[in-house]
Amino acid sequence: MPGMGHSLRAAALLAFVVLSILVSLLISSVQQFGAGIYHLSNATVAGDEEEFASLRGALIYQLNQRRKEIIPLLLLDGEETWESFYQRDQTQDSPMGYSLWNEITHGSRKAHMDEMDCQSLVDMQAVEVLGSGYTKLVVKVNLAGGQPVALKLVNEQGIDMGKCVEDFKDPRGCRELVSYKLKKEIVLLQRLQHPNVIKLKGHCAGDAGGRGGEGGEVTVILEQGNPLQMIQLLQSPWEDRFRVCLDLVRLLHFLSQSPLGSVALLDFQPRQFVTVSGELKLTDLDDASAEETSCQTHADCTLQFPHRNFTLPCSAKGVCEGLNEKRNIYNAYRYFFTYLLPHQAPPGFTHLVDHIMNSTGELKADINHTLEAFEHILLLYKSGLHLDNLPPSIIRDYTVMRGMGTSGDTEYRCWPSYSQQGCLLSVHSAREAAFICNSHSQCNSFTLTGQKTWTGRLLASFRSSFSHLVPDGTSEVYVKKTKAPETSIV
């Protein structure tokens, strides 16, 4: 039904335009919004001043609780308590933690030359809504110079905002309360800088001039990434799937000994990650926690998962040893390793992958040993040491034509391939490519293209036949001697 198809497309376009307008309005409100500390709405519940006062007091209590959650993240090396920090907050003294807090709550300035602020958002263009949740809206925008960035801001239509307004009858105060997750995320992104954590490019608090207050909205400005697509990743070559797992382990190793201590990712899901130029990055930090779990007995240190429970030791200090680290490891195992690591792993790595799966699935290894196991596989894979058992003579069955490419190819498909139209795989050398070609009944020739993957391995294109050789200074063509066709050089 063509008419229905046009209607659906029109409706989808209209929805996109409406969302873009909504996003623009929300951003505009961020740039223009300014408020003082705890200046909550003066609107009262009609005819019930006492109830309003009670609700206002409850909301202020919640605001103070959220602030207490953030302040420990600002303190350096436990040098002061949150109470002394609060007293310092009332003065002009500006230690590092206070400066960051002041920047977040009372406006935005450029702490470093490469950071962005409210002025950076002037004349931006909303491109698409990347996601929305209970608390936040994530939007892709192009800045005035054309640079794409991702913005995080309060989701005005989200469940958290709606429930707060229903409970406290104060939209402005609720906006401030909900924005504390964004403030916490800014602090964590400042404290937890790592190649596998999304880069904080800046933020905007209050109006476009950076004049805001604690009641002002906050917009977080992040580098633009692509949402992690697990279904697409499952169809990718093993090398790319291994990269995601390796990046994740490197991240967890950092979090286990971060400047804040051992950090647990309480909402550990693939949707919390993006990729930037193929590199995995954690993009959602508001549910990260550096709190240690206190205990009196080992029974107090139980990690509960849907199908497994683990009991960890209670230390003499009264905290569960390594609980945050082990929680992260097992979540990595059940959400990532199980799906991405074993399938089609190179034969030489099967026993190494099995060891990783067993040690992480049973929590037998800490993050240090897990990272060592991954780095060992990477070293073998990049060096080609796992291919030592391939006979050197295997390449003698091929005639090589250097500085040449092919045209008129008869392709065949293999899986998983870097190309959906043919068979394009990564190899360490021509010797490995010859071994792969010999294992494919359709293969009679292959080309080393000169292109490389993230590990430095070569991309090899395998085919059944070709009609012409063409000059190509970056490629080498290998043809089976017993199957060498009569070809012409163009």
Image (cartoon, grey):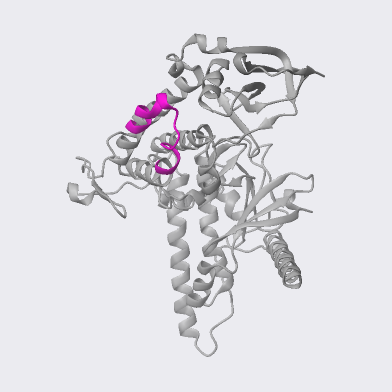
Say if the magenta span includes residue 432: no
Q: Residue farthest to the left? A: 297
Q: Is residue 227 left or right of residue 54?
A: right
**In the displayed structure, would residue 208 be above or below residue 243?**
below
On screen, 160 above or below 395?
A: below
Foreground pick, 446 / 111: 446
Q: Residue furthest right?
A: 490
Residue 167 placement (x, y as % from top left)? 47, 76
Q: Judge by depth and name the residue closer to the eye, 438 or 121.
A: 438
Does residue 55 appear to the left or right of 224 in the view shown? left
**Residue 489 seen anywhere in this rendered image of the structure:** yes
What is the span of residues highlighted in magenta in the rendered image? 338-355
User: In the picture, which quadrant includes the N terminus?
Assistant: bottom right
Q: Left or right: 127 with respect to 107?
A: right
Rendered image quadrant of residue 155 = bottom right
Residue 443 in percent (x, y) is at 59, 26
Residue 185: where, in percent of width, then height? 52, 50
Say which residue appears at 74% left-offset and 71% top-offset.
7
Say whether residue 340 is magenta.
yes
